[in-house]
Amino acid sequence: MENKSHALAAGIFVLVVAAMLAGLAIWLTRDDANYQSYELSTKDGVTGLQPQAAVRYKGVAVGKVTRIGFDPQVNGNVLIRIAVNDHAPISPTTFAVLGYQGVTGLAHVLLDDAEQPYPELPPGPSGLPRLPLKPSPFGKLAEQAPAILSQVEEATRRINQLLGDNNQQLLTQALSNIGQAAGSVSALTQRLDTTLTQRVDPALAALTPLAGDARQTLQALRKAGDSVTTLATDFSQTTRRLTAEGGAIDQITVGTQALARAADQFGASTLPRLNRAADDTSRAARQVSRTAGGVSDNPQLFIYGSGRIPPGPGEPGFAAGTQ
């Protein structure tokens, strides 16, 4: 009887301790926040995502995944239901994407905002609002994996073709030709060194006196330039003196103007008078010429004058006793 009472007491103690532990666990895991449910629909795989996975808004935990199943509206799509805290700033620009934690492969839902609002998605059969789910980087990588593998295969094939036996022989010949070219360059370098030592160095030594002569020539040219500068200065001063007001050019101009006025006066007054005197002289000369002609034809003018001379004996019209 005593053993049964001890066993009963131990059983009751175990039950009480288990109830206390269950109450403590419930108390520690209680969550008094209000949540709003949303749905996400995607055609991509959700490997690594489990119920109770975290939902983060820009890295801050705001909820959890409550259910993962298939979308009854779109055949083949995965439907994810999440519970988000009412304090999370969900807006028309908010979208979701799957994130992965390191090398563990565990996934969670990340919420973020886009620059432009997304078209509002119609609610599902449950009536819950839906958020757009963008493909994750790993999903994009999985989509591009076949193309990447084909490109890698093509690159491997080309590398194998490049490293084939024929190309290796060609590469060996090219290396040999490069070695021969290097030897030729070395020989050419030695010849250049010999040429520099035997010919260029003496020529450089002969350039020193030539440089001295060139320096003296430059000094002479500098002096000549100074002389030319002085001559130009004197010429400029002379030009300023000639072109100054009252200078030689002005005096020449005044003299030319006076000479022009004298020429105008000569042409206006003196020249007509000379023309008239010349006309008078010409008339007098003609009169003298006529007089000389008359005297030559009739020298008796000096005796009988300029009247008519009566005819003499033997001349027509002569009459005796009329003399």
Image (cartoon, rainbow, N blue to C red):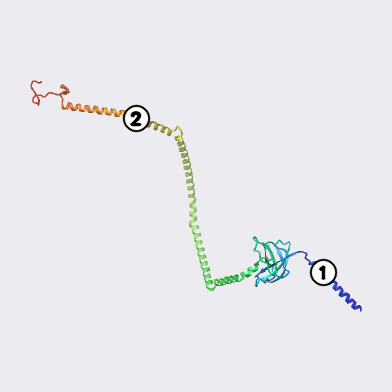
Q: In this view, does 112 lie to the left or right of 257?
A: right
* Quarter that holds the C terminus: top left
Query: x, y (%) of residue 1?
Result: 91, 79
Q: In this view, does 206 lie to the left or right of 11?
A: left
User: SS class of the residue under badge 2?
Assistant: helix
The answer to whether 72 is drawn above or below residue 269 in the figure is below
Q: Give the CA distance from mark 1 to mark 2.
A: 148 Å
Q: In this view, does 285 lie to the left or right of 134?
A: left
Query: x, y (%) of residue 62?
Result: 73, 64
Query: x, y (%) of residue 12?
Result: 87, 74
The answer to whether 316 is drawn above or below residue 4 in the figure is above
> Looking at the picture, which amino acid does disc 1 mark?
Gly
In the picture of the structure, the residue carrying the numbered disc 1 is 23
Q: In which quarter of the image is residue 306?
A: top left
In the picture of the structure, the residue carrying the numbered disc 2 is 268
User: SS class of the residue under badge 1?
Assistant: helix
Q: In which quarter of the image is residue 38?
A: bottom right
Residue that appears at 52% across and 68% down? 174
Q: Residues within 10 Å of mark 2 (few under 14, many from 20)?
A: few
Residue that appears at 31% across and 29% down? 272
User: In the image as oriented, which residue stretches furthest toward the right?
Assistant: 2
The answer to whether 239 is drawn above or below residue 56 in the figure is above
Residue sitting nearer the eye, 251 or 318 = 318
What is the tally of numbered marks visible in this picture?
2
Residue sitting nearer the eye, 317 or 121 = 121
> Looking at the picture, which amino acid does disc 2 mark?
Ala
Q: Residues within 10 Å of mark 1 (few under 14, many from 20)?
A: few
